[in-house]
Amino acid sequence: MREKLHFHPVASALAITTGILHTIFTIITALWPRFALQTANDWFPGTDFQNILTTKINIGSFIRGLIEIVIVSYLTGAILAWTYNKCYEHCKKRKWI
């Protein structure tokens, strides 16, 4: 018997992972701003981040962004676990799995 995905561990893992990635990307941006600019442009084709890039990263902006991205990631993980469980129950009921 499969165990359900529990939303809190899934949501927490996603939030922690995203927080770590945000910190790493902030450090990369501070150390190698041209690389960060090129990466942002690659991830969003047709968008030019050149005019909005600043090499000055302040702690307030970093902390605010970190808090925001962790909250959004936690909510995303919770929705993912809930949706997965609903889909699993639906498919199991119909004997598709």
Image: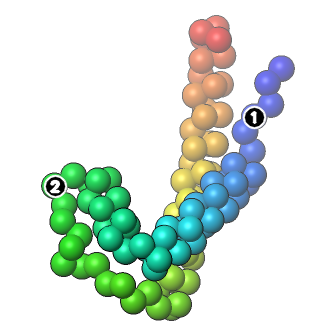
Which quarter of the figure is the N terminus placed in? top right
Using a 10 Å C-alpha cutoff, classify the residue at mark 2 as few (fewer than 14 neighbours), some (14 to 19) or many (20 or more). Answer: few
Where residue 57 appears, as percent x and y from the top left, is 44, 87
Residue 26 seen by the camera: no
Q: Where 58 falls versus 22 (above or below)? A: below
Identify the residue shown where x is 64% and y is 58%: 17
Q: Is residue 41 left or right of residue 29?
A: left
Q: Residue at x 21, y 73 (%)?
A: 50
Residue furthest top as drawn: 95
Residue ID at (75%, 34%): 4
Q: Amino acid at mark 1?
A: Lys
Q: Nearer the viewer, residue 38 or 6?
A: 38
Which image quarter holds the C terminus?
Answer: top right
Colour scheme of the picture: rainbow
Q: Residue furthest right?
A: 1
Label for residue 4?
1
Distance from Cα at disc 1 to Cα at disc 2? 41 Å
- Amino acid type at circle 2 is Gly
Q: State yes or no: discs 1 and 2 in contact (Cβ < 8 Å).
A: no
Which dot marks residue 46?
2
Which quarter of the figure has residue 46? bottom left
Tag shown at residue 72: none
Of residues 46 and 74, the one nearer the viewer is: 46
Residue 82 is situated, as x and y percent measured from the top left of the image, at: 62, 42
| Element marked by disc 2 | loop
Q: Secondary structure at mark 1?
A: loop
**In the shown orientation, is residue 26 left or right of residue 42?**
right
- Camera-nearest label, 1 or 2: 2
